[in-house]
Amino acid sequence: MDKTAQNDIALSDIVKPLLDWYEKNARALPWRKNADPYRVWVSEIMLQQTRVEAVIPYYERFMQHFPTVQSLADADEDRLLKLWEGLGYYRRARNLKKAARAIVEQHGGKFPKDYEDIRALPGIGDYTAGAIASICFDQPVAAVDGNVLRVMARLTGSHEDVSSPLVKKETAKRLEALYPEGRCGDFTQALMELGAVICLPNGVPKCGDCPLSFLCRAFRDGTQMELPVKTKKAPRKREVRTVFLLLCGDLVAIRRREEEGLLGGLWEFPNVTGDLTFEEAEEVLHQWRVCPFAMEKGVRGKHVFTHVQWDMKSYSVRCDNMPDGFDWVSRETLLAERTLPSAFRPFLRML
């Protein structure tokens, strides 16, 4: 943190007003009903890059199907991914199952309490390990995410780059010195909550409702909208793809993607890179040994991933045959049993 910012406020002064505010204003979220580490862990993984409002129904449904670590460790992967359908970042779901198996095999089915043991589980980084250790086991370990970094940058008036691992590490160190014994979980969640509902990332923060505004250097200096400083991400790569809805009677062709890479191991409608003309599309069908008797342009779609954007056009193709290389399924089977990523869901209406 900037030296000038460090000398401007006594960070220890934030603890009581922040906890008092959280006690009165904390949202009633399903994973806050108790501090069971399994429930907290699943919620933290689901909440990565996903809004709270979107997560709640998925979380509740997930807990109904997999109420314990053991049930998750034993889960059928296709069923697990189907429950995750629409949340995106499917690697999170696979890592949940891997970590559940590790807990069963290495810890006797009991969630580990030690921070390093938690951190060693598949799919768990510093932030998630800190959240579980503090919320569930009352350990003074900080959980530093974007919300917490934003709060701290504004509080201290720091213009350091919050994308820097060194800044994250220093922020965690400074916060861990403040953790109140017996209320570590509340302190972690209060910081998260303040960043989520008051010290907002997009738009004007609600400084008039903030319990820490009397200490906040950014509020005093009017620099809330300038902070935090963050390195701009490189522009997303743009890919144009052509998607094929191959229809034979009441069946549609799907195929499973390669295990590695984007959307690894999930189902998709057959597609290729490029904005294909009718003639080019017919050549692809010939290579796939598809015998079309009718083909027409279909809907367009767009999907934004973290580092790439897909701009998609489509063709609806009526076929005389069902060549190998695809799974031919009914619409009902596709919807009920196969995991179709959000990128391909706009094309369902063509069925």
Image (tube, grey):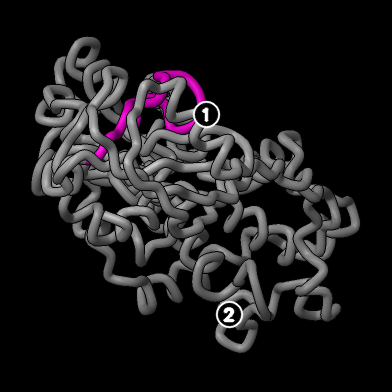
- Between 42 and 177, the one lying in front of the other is 42
From the viewer's perspective, is residue 227 above or below residue 136?
below
Q: For the residues carrying marks 1 and 2, which lies nearer the camera in this image?
A: 1
- Between 214 and 349, the one lying in front of the other is 349
- Between 85 and 62, the one lying in front of the other is 85
* 255 part of magenta stretch: yes
Mark number displayed over residue 210 = 2
Q: How many marks?
A: 2
Q: Is residue 95 visible?
A: no
State how far apart marks 1 and 2 are (Cα).
62 Å
Q: Is residue 20 visible?
A: yes
Tell me if label 1 and label 2 are in contact, CB under 8 Å: no
* 219 part of magenta stretch: no
Give x and y (percent) for residue 308: 63, 42
The type of residue carrying mark 2 is Cys
Provide the residue designation for mark 1: 283
The region drawn magenta spans 252-266
Give x and y (percent) for residue 64: 9, 48
Q: Residue drawn at (78%, 43%), measured in percent from left and top?
A: 234
In the image, farthest residue toward the bottom: 208
Magenta region, main secondary structure: loop
User: Helix, strand, or loop for circle 1?
Assistant: helix
- Quarter of the image that includes the C terminus: bottom left
Q: Residue drawn at (47%, 49%), measured in percent from left and top?
A: 314
Mark number displayed over residue 224 = none
Give the quadrant of residue 327: top left
Residue 211 falls left or right of residue 3: left
Q: Residue drawn at (65%, 53%), measured in percent from left and top?
A: 149
